[in-house]
Image (cartoon, rainbow, N blue to C red):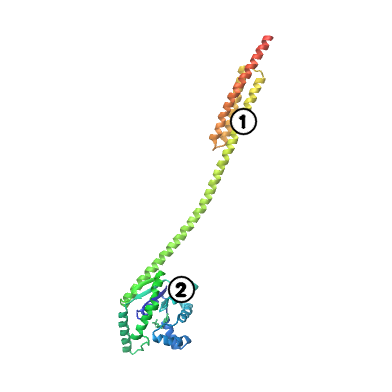
Amino acid sequence: MRLILLGPPGAGKGTQALRLVQRYGIVQLSTGDMLRAAVKAETPIGLKAKDIMASGALVPDDVVVGIISDRLDQPDAANGFILDGFPRTVPQAEALDLLLKAKQVKLDAVIELRVNEGALLARVETRVAEMQARGEAVRADDTPEVLSKRLASYRSQTEPLIHYYSEQRKLLTVDGMMTIEEVTKEIDRVLAAIRSADAKKTVAKAAAAKSARRASKAVGKGRKASSSKASGKATESAAKPAAKKAAKVTKKAAAKKAAKVTKKAAKSKAPKKVAKQTTKAAAKSTAAKAKKPASKAKKPAAKAKKPASKPGKAAKVAKATSRKAAGKTAKKVTKRRAKV
Ligand code: AMP
């Protein structure tokens, strides 16, 4: 989980962050705590930040962005983190976006603790009184006067982040005026909701990827099928002209044979009847033969069959021709016989 806790000073960000650390096993990254540690250790950053913090103003953006960038690189942040008190300005938020992008890390949610300012002042007063009663040191900026100033800088510089993260659809608003327990429960509830939404997204993504894989497989199969279908068509269309050709050849052959036989019959000067019979037989056998190649070409059989009936026509012509020829021959024979 990578979270940001957003809310005015005294809204309870620190308290809720500690609970989230225990619940999710992630680290709390509080720029306020880091700056206080730097002030205590009197580091160059601490010396620079000390007076600014005491006045209730904000430390320069580049300083806090530098601190956070280094902290995010620590191994304990790899498992997840809660940013508490950072970002506090839009430029800080933009710098954080770039940092996370560069580190290839995704922010899960921004939890805004919404509180009313009047109640915050009352809370701070109670807390200061309790700390003093326990004999604890009170923070320099934890006074009603400094709090008013911090609230003013929250309104002007930090509140625009509500819009910034709601635009990014990362904002989850929780009523910070409830008891600490109730706020914790509500944070748990909203985080559970985004976790289950994320899980659903992951499942949906996996399902989409699976169906995309299936679809691409199906397209591949379809291509194969259509290419084989196309080759089937090609065979069919190739068979058509072949059958036509076969029919043509058959037609020609039948006519030729019939004409030859008729010629022969005429030449042989056979009697009319014989010539007629021979012509008939020749036409028949030619037509029968013509039928054969048609049956060989299976599909275009209908087309191939047609020419088979045409040799019949040819046979008729041949028959008529042979009749004439036979008639002439018979006449000649009769004439000769008469002469004899
Ligand atoms: P906090 O404990 O978060 O309320 O921070 C205490 C003080 O540290 C603030 O009043 C600021 O002066 C300073 N500080 C903490 N975080 C930031 C930040 N992100 N940007 C600028 N100043 C900060």
Label 1 neighbour load within 10 Å: few <14, some 14-19, many 20+: some
Q: Give the residue number, with chain letter if any, for mark 2.
A: 97
* Percent position of residue 276, x then y: 60, 20
Q: Is residue 154 left or right of residue 327?
A: left
* Percent position of residue 16, x then y: 36, 77
Image quarter where the N terminus lies is: bottom left
Q: Which mark is residue 252?
A: 1
Label 2 neighbour load within 10 Å: few <14, some 14-19, many 20+: some
* Percent position of residue 325, x then y: 63, 19
Marks 2/1 in contact by CB < 8 Å: the verdict is no
Residue 143 can be seen, yes or no: no
Instruction: Look at label 1 and name its amino acid.
Output: Lys
Image quadrant in which you'd find residue 184: bottom left
Image quadrant in which you'd find residue 307: top right
Residue 160 can be seen, yes or no: yes
Q: Is residue 44 left or right of residue 121?
A: right
Image quarter where the C terminus lies is: top right
